[in-house]
Each structure stands twice: as C-alpha cells, then as structure tokens.
Image (tube, helix red, strand yellow):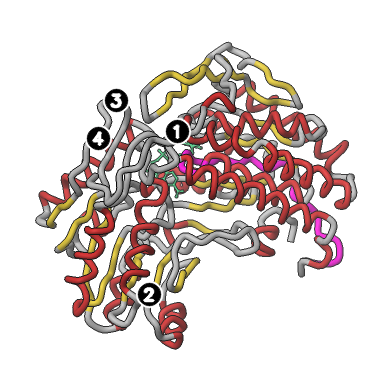
Amino acid sequence: MSSVWDYAAAPESRDVVSVAAQYGLFIDGEFTPAADGRTFETVNPATEERLAGVAAAGPADVDRAVRAARSAYERVWGPMPGSQRAKYLYRIARILQERAREFAVLETLDNGKPIRESRDVDVPLAAAHFFYHAGWADKLGYAGFGAAPRPLGVAGQVIPWNFPLLMAAWKLAPALAAGNTCVLKPAETTPLTALLLASVCQQAGLPPGVVNVVTGAGDTGAALVTHPGVDKIAFTGSTEVGKEIRRALAGTGRRLTLELGGKAANVVYDDAPLDQAVEGIVNGIFFNQGHVCCAGSRLLVQESVAGPVVERLKRRIDTLRLGDPLDKNTDLGAINSRQQLDKIRELSASGEAEGAGRWSPQCELPSRGYWFPPTVFTGVSQSHRIAREEIFGPVLSVLTFRTPEEAVAKANNTPYGLSAGVWTEKGSRILWMAQRLRSGVVWANTYNRFDPASPFGGYRESGFGREGGRHGLEAYLDV
Ligand code: NDP
C-alpha cells in the first residue's frame, strides 16, 4: 500500500524456534503417534510452505486422552489443594513469559498473523490468563459460589485457529485453577503452539494426564465432544458447529459453554473524536486480519459525519502495511487458510453483486500464500449478506444512522450478540447505548480490549457462558 514512510524490512528471526518435522499427540504427559499412525500437515499460510506433520487423533486416541484425564483428576489434580495447583499455573505463566519470543514466532508461522500482534497481544495475554487464574486456585471459596465449590471433572475443549495459543490459555487456565483436568483439541490449521504449550506443561512438571492435547480435524473434535467420559465441553468456533455440538449434548446432562460467531456494530456518533474513532475502526476490523469473533465488522456511522469518517478511514487504511507476517512493520498478515480466503472472496463478491460500493487501497499482494487486501464496502444496506453474515476477514461494511434509536435498532438487527463499540464524547449516551445493545461486551471509545479479569461471551447465536473473570470460573465449577 502507499505508505507515508517506507520502512526498511525488520524481520524477526525464525531461528528462535525449532519446528520439528513431526509432532505427536500429548497424552498422559507424553508425546505419542496416533494409534493408527495417521498424520496431517500444517503449512505457513503466508508462503504455503509445509511447516510440520502432525498426528491425527482418532477415536481410540481421544478415548486414551479422556481416560488419562480422568485418572489424573481422580488421583492427583482433584484432591490437590488449590495452593498447590496455583504453583503449577504460576510456573506455566512464567515459562510462557520466558519463552515468549519462541511462542510469538511459532504462532506467526503457523497462523499468518503479524509478529507485532503475536508478540504484543497473544503471548502476553496468554501468560496473563495463567497468572490471573493461578491467583484464583486457592481462593475459590471466596468467588461467590459457596465455601468449597467442586470442580466438574474432565473438560473437553475445542478451539479455533484465529488465536491458537490465547484460546488454549482461555480454556486451560480456568479449568485447571478450578481443579478440572483437560483434553484440548486445537484447530487443524494451527496446532503448533498448543503442542509447544504441552511441552511447557512437561517443563513445569505438571502431573501427567492433567493436560492432554489431541490434534486433528473436525472428526477429532466430534469424537471428543461426544465422548461419554467428558463432564464439560467448552467450544469456541463457528455458530454452525456450535449448534451441532449443542444438539449432540442435549439430554446428556453434560455441561456446555459455546463462544461462537459475531457481527459486531461499531457505532460512531457525530460528537466522537473522529481521528481516535478511525483508529478504533481500523483496530476493530483489521486486527488479526479480521479473524476475530468480536471484530467490528459493521461500522454504523452517524449520517452527518459519514463522509469525513469514510474519507479519513480510507486515508488511514492507505498507510497500513500488508506483507511478511514476521516483519515487525507489518500491520496485516496472511489469511489463515485457502478455505477461509475462498469464503472472504465469495462474501465480498456478493457485496458487489448486491450493489454496495467496494474499495481497497492500491496494494500488491504477495504471489504465494493466502492474502486479501483491507476492504471497505459503502452504501451497504441491512439486507446485504455482508451486513448479516460473519465474513471473518479484513472486510468492513459501512452503514449509516440518524438517531440513537436507529443506531440501536440497526446494531441489534443481527442473530449474533457478542460485542459492540460506541464512540461519543457523552458519557450518558455510552450508558444509554450499553443498556440497549444486546451484546456481551460493549467497548466505549476503544475496541478489542481484553483482560483476564473481564468476562467475555455472547447472547443468542454468539453462544452462552462467559470466559474470564469470576464468571468464567463458574463454567468449570459444580455450582
Ligand atoms: P469451526 O467451528 O469448524 O472450527 C472450530 C473448531 O471446531 C476447530 O478446532 C475445528 O476443527 C473443530 N470442529 C469442526 N467440526 C467439529 C465438530 N463437528 N465437532 C467438534 N469440533 C469440530 O470453524 P472453521 O475453522 O470451519 O471456520 C468457519 C467459520 O467459522 C469462519 O469463517 C468464521 O466465520 C467462524 N469462526 C468463528 C470463530 C470464533 O471465534 N467465533 C473462530 C473460528 C471460526 P478443525 O479445525 O480441524 O476443522
């Protein structure tokens, strides 16, 4: 893109991490091949280069992992005092910090996200989740769930590819703090940092079986969520798969939390500090290439300032740098997979076909790998697919409103309900909006802020249950 300044390349060295040719499953404290020897490959989406072969867990492997988790729960982790469990969690958190660069580079290689984000957001937040929950492990009796809340047992956890390490931390840290043991299924396209985290569990001396990692595709996830030995399922991913899981678990009595898709409105009023709002809009939709469930993918801008906001937005987008994710100057990295790229292309084409105006900056895309330029659609109406469906890519749909009532009605006109943003200088209007927006999180004059102490989760088709904070612990306690 036509950058204001040209920066010299500043690539992070990939020598800080050694990627093995082949990875095993992590079951009962050891890395092992799949029982039937099946494997799959994971590639660097920025180059399509093969990174590693990874074991594909079948039902027999999932069964072994669940049994290992059950045995560890009954013999070691369940009976262990919270103060002892805390020590392991603190240890994992500290090792994550010590090995932060290694994790950041591996995440960027496997996922395609810019190193700036994996280094400054994903890895520090993952460590923060372990630190935060380590603090709860010996204080569960003060969390408001009774004097001695009990864990649930074995947690089966299925996570997506957009924040592979961070989602692993969101799932494992509260479950372990509460006294549960875990079987984690990372996404097929991004298994490597979860496996590195498994080796950190070994390094921390975590008792075997407390954390197990079964890599594989959707069928591995399905084997885990339907396994009768699992007491609780926590899933983050698409609404479609979330619905399938809910159907599969109905009537089993097993606990379930779902964190699914979103189509968040980022609402900009005419009294907002516009340059600050433009930064928030850019962060809201282009952070992590828009592969974010709470991405601000619908910009609702007050009609009187729509022209200037869109103009400033385009000028700002023109300065974003797209390219090598390992380069520290890069703002936009690669799309995680061919399949996701196809989905973004198809939905963007529908935007044009349905009559919205499409704009992207002058932008040279690398010849190899999966890439999509930052894209803005104007003249979008609420019936357009790009205003209704989750694109999960760097594509913004701009709509306008005149009155606060109209802003609320349009923001809530979605089957989802995960997040929203409000930009205005009036505190009273922020509170008025927050009371009316049907979304789990409302950010005011900021966007995409996360903290382990703050509960996160949705309404309606965005799922149910909360992760983080005191509320997140509840999902792993028998209360
Ligand atoms: P999925 O929901 O398919 O993937 C999420 C996780 O579930 C992955 O680990 C996946 O495994 C696993 N999985 C797939 N099928 C099943 C099943 N039947 N039972 C149990 N687990 C299963 O998301 P996709 O990767 O297919 O992405 C599709 C769309 O979903 C995206 O375009 C985006 O719109 C949305 N999405 C939303 C996310 C969010 O955070 N809200 C995160 C990811 C995607 P595997 O990777 O091996 O298929």
Q: Which residue is mark 3?
A: 368
Mark 2: give few (<14), some (14-19) or many (20+) Cα within 10 Å: many
Foreground residue among 358 and 65 = 358
Q: Which residue is mark 1?
A: 11
Start-end of magenta stretch: 145-163
Mark 3: give few (<14), some (14-19) or many (20+) Cα within 10 Å: few
User: From the viewer's perspective, is residue 458 above or below residue 80?
Assistant: below
| Residue type at the position of mark 2 | Trp
Q: Earlier in the sequence, mark 2 or mark 4?
A: 4
Whether label 3 touches label 4, CB < 8 Å? no
Circle 1 SS class:
loop
Which corner quadrant of the image does residue 417 belong to? Answer: bottom left
Foreground residue among 439 and 284 = 284
Q: Earlier in the sequence, mark 4 or mark 1?
A: 1
Q: Is residue 150 magenta?
A: yes
Q: Which residue is mark 2?
A: 423
Q: Please indicate, yes or no, whether residue 297 appears anywhere in the rendered image.
A: yes
